[in-house]
Image (cartoon, helix red, strand yellow):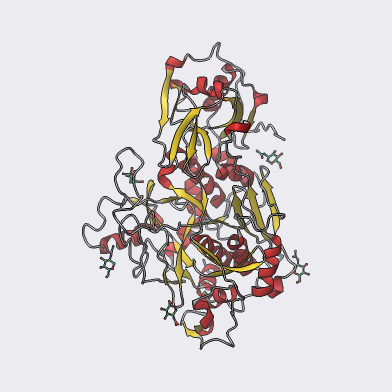
């Protein structure tokens, strides 16, 4: 069922234009080259309904950003004074003249208030229209596009708007968005037999000075369990409370789900105290969490089992957001925007109480995401940060691009029509308002080869990382990878965590998985423990983490070996200090706890 919301902040005009603007008066708003792998097929059926999303300008976003940085900077007097949902909404509300102009334009196309769904701040309008009307409104033609995977979308590569609306509309989707937000997972295999993780029967513990008690079970070098992570990241013996209001969450999209029975098996093996406990399931837009198909490909064991296992007994939530149904031409299914982040943001930004830590293990090549869309999604993450939420995202599993060190077969080709080889940054990891988590392996730790890292082409380098990133770049040999990456872009990952050989339960069996999909929830688990310490001390949650962590001179295990090949190169090296393979390093919970309690 759809609900129609008219925000109290929005005063919409009752004036309507006499007639729709003639097509000839439309001016090109955006055009893209369809990403590699997509082929244009037949024209879209004219009566196919499209759920349009129209973004109005958030004209005070720079002010929101200023608030975000002030409340996230430990050296600022306002550190921790997070904003309320209402304060955020006021800052991102579009100017009344934009609301009026867009409302009048929609009315001129026969779309009245009753047809529109406005976001609480009024910065988004959703409206369902047939393809024929969308084509008229945007002077464009929609086609069915097919991906090499078989996925189908209804899209266009260019659209226009009346010239007077260009300053009142930031973007319209679905139009140019072809990205495929994938779960980050590189390796998966069933172990075939029970894995022996008991320290008693294995070799002598491995000496790791920063670990709890200075050592880590020998088995952790080949199989990662919750116990291994607590040892390695110095959190053994820390017991969080379940009733402080602190919460942790993980997200699933595109009909991927979390299996409850596997979680119990996992708890029995790795977190016995947690057996019988479970997470809150929040389904957004009809997101699935179908327990009848536990063997499905889409089980998200590593997203939930480790985050919730590390943080137990901190209450946990799994958000499952439906992707749009993929377009199937034969049965005339409606096409949707396939922008799961926006649907998720719509939902969480409208909550009054949010989990303080949320982990997401999805992403796509930044260049497949229209820049206008990336900017708005990233702005949505800033709105969550301002309200005191820490967002972790996996940094990607292709090193500096496609994971291929061979120049002859690299798939790192630019999408701008020039077909140059370039490193391919990942989004949302490249958004400066999230904490991007890269990967390590083994004990003692080294960078894992697939750890996604690099430099954004959309987002400029934020000041919080200026010093360490400049330092890294200055230490590169002159000319290193010149032209392959953007030295002025937001650099990632920010931090890292183990990302290989995670022992999870899948369809009732033990399996080992690898990917930064495991690193992001792991890091989130430790952030949630830090929030436990802060909230128990009467302090606010950590919120947007990056300004804090880049200001610390300890608290992370610097990873200085390994590299992340891709795009026909060996990628960057993990080095002393920050690097685009492992960021600042992996967490030392014991040290961080003391630091955040005095922040
Ligand atoms: C951990 O495993 C790696 C990779 O197999 C190996 O090189 C290293 O020696 C092992 N470390 C210890 C302490 O056994
Ligand atoms: C918190 O833990 C206590 C003691 O273990 C238990 O009785 C209670 O049910 C838990 N509360 C929640 C909200 O999980
Ligand atoms: C926002 O939350 C309010 C109150 O719970 C609800 O009535 C409204 O439908 C929600 N709006 C959106 C856009 O989800
Ligand atoms: C490099 O990054 C900057 C800062 O975000 C951006 O303005 C510029 O367009 C990027 N260059 C390319 C070639 O993408
Ligand atoms: C990485 O380190 C190796 C060995 O020191 C060196 O040969 C190589 O040039 C370094 N690569 C980069 C990109 O700095």
Front-most of 352 and 572?
572
- Furthest residue in direction top, as rendered: 18
- Furthest residue in direction left, as rendered: 478
Give how far across and how far down residue 28 sits, in percent.
41, 25
| Residue at the spot 40% in from the left edge and 65% down from the top edge | 449
Give how far across and how far down residue 515 sits, in percent.
49, 62
Q: Quadrant of residue 446?
A: bottom left
Instruction: Judge left or right: residue 492 versus residue 482.
Output: right
Vertical comparison of 143 with 313: above or below: above
Give how far across and how far down residue 274 sits, in percent.
70, 70
| Residue at the spot 48% in from the left edge and 43% down from the top edge | 179
Q: Is residue 75 visible?
A: no
Front-most of 164 and 582?
582
Q: Is residue 391 visible?
A: yes
Vertical comparison of 396 with 371: above or below: below
Quarter the N terminus occupies: top right
Ligand 1: give its quadrant.
Answer: bottom left
Give how far across and how far down residue 118 sits, in percent.
62, 32
């Amino acid at each position: 069922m759809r609900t129609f919301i008219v925000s109290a902040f929005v005063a919409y005009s009752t004036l309507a234009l006499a007639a729709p603007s003639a097509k000839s008066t439309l001016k090109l708003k955006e055009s893209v080259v369809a990403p590699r792998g997509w082929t244009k097929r037949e024209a879209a059926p004219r009566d196919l309904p499209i759920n349009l999303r129209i973004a109005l300008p958030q004209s005070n976003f720079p002010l929101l950003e200023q608030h975000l940085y002030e409340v996230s900077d430990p050296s600022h007097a306002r550190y921790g004074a997070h904003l309320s949902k209402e304060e955020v909404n006021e800052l991102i509300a579009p100017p009344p003249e934009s609301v009026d102009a867009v409302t009048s334009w929609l009315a001129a196309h026969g779309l009245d208030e009753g047809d529109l769904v406005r976001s609480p701040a009024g910065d988004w309008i959703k409206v369902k229209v047939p393809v024929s009307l969308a084509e008229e409104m945007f002077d464009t033609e929609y086609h069915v596009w097919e991906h090499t995977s078989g996925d189908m979308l209804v899209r266009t590569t260019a659209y226009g708007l009346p010239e007077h609306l260009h300053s009142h509309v930031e973007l319209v989707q679905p139009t140019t968005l072809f990205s495929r937000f994938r779960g980050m997972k590189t390796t998966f295999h069933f172990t075939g037999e029970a894995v022996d993780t008991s320290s008693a029967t294995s070799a002598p513990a491995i000496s790791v000075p920063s670990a709890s008690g200075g050592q880590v079970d020998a088995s952790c070098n080949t199989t990662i369990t919750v116990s291994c992570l607590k040892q390695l990241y110095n959190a053994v013996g820390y017991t969080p409370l379940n009733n402080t209001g602190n919460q942790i969450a993980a997200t699933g999209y595109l009909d991927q789900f979390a299996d409850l029975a596997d979680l119990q098996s996992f708890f029995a093996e790795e977190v016995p105290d947690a057996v019988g406990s479970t997470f809150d399931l929040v389904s957004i837009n009809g997101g699935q969490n179908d327990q009848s198909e536990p063997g499905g490909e889409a089980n998200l064991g590593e997203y939930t089992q480790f985050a919730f296992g590390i943080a137990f007994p901190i209450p946990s939530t799994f958000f499952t957001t439906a992707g749009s149904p993929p377009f199937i031409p034969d049965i005339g299914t409606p096409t949707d925007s396939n922008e799961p982040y926006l649907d998720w943001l719509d939902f969480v930004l409208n909550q009054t109480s949010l989990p303080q830590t949320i982990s997401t293990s999805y992403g796509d090549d930044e260049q497949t995401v229209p820049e206008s869309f990336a900017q708005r999604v990233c702005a949505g993450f800033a709105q969550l940060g301002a309200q005191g939420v820490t967002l972790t995202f996996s940094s990607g599993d292709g090193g500096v691009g496609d994971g291929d060190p061979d120049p002859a077969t690299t798939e790192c080709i630019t999408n701008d029509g020039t077909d140059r080889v370039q490193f391919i940054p990942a989004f949302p990891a490249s958004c400066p308002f999230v904490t991007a988590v890269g990967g390590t392996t083994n004990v003692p730790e080294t960078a894992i080869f697939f750890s996604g890292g690099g430099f954004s082409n959309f987002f400029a380098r934020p000041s919080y990382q200026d010093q360490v990133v400049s330092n890294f770049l200055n230490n590169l040999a002159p000319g290193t990878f010149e032209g392959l990456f953007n030295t002025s872009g937001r650099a990632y990952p920010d931090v890292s965590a183990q990302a290989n050989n995670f022992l999870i339960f899948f369809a009732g069996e033990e399996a080992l998985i690898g990917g930064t999909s495991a690193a992001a929830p792991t890091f989130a688990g430790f952030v949630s423990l830090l929030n436990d310490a802060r909230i128990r001390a009467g302090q606010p949650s950590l919120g947007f983490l990056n300004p804090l962590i880049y200001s610390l001179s300890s608290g992370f295990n610097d990873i200085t070996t390994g590299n992340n090949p891709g795009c026909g190169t060996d990628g960057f090296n993990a080095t002393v200090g920050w690097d685009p393979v492992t960021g600042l390093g992996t967490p030392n919970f014991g040290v961080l706890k003391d630091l955040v309690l005095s922040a």
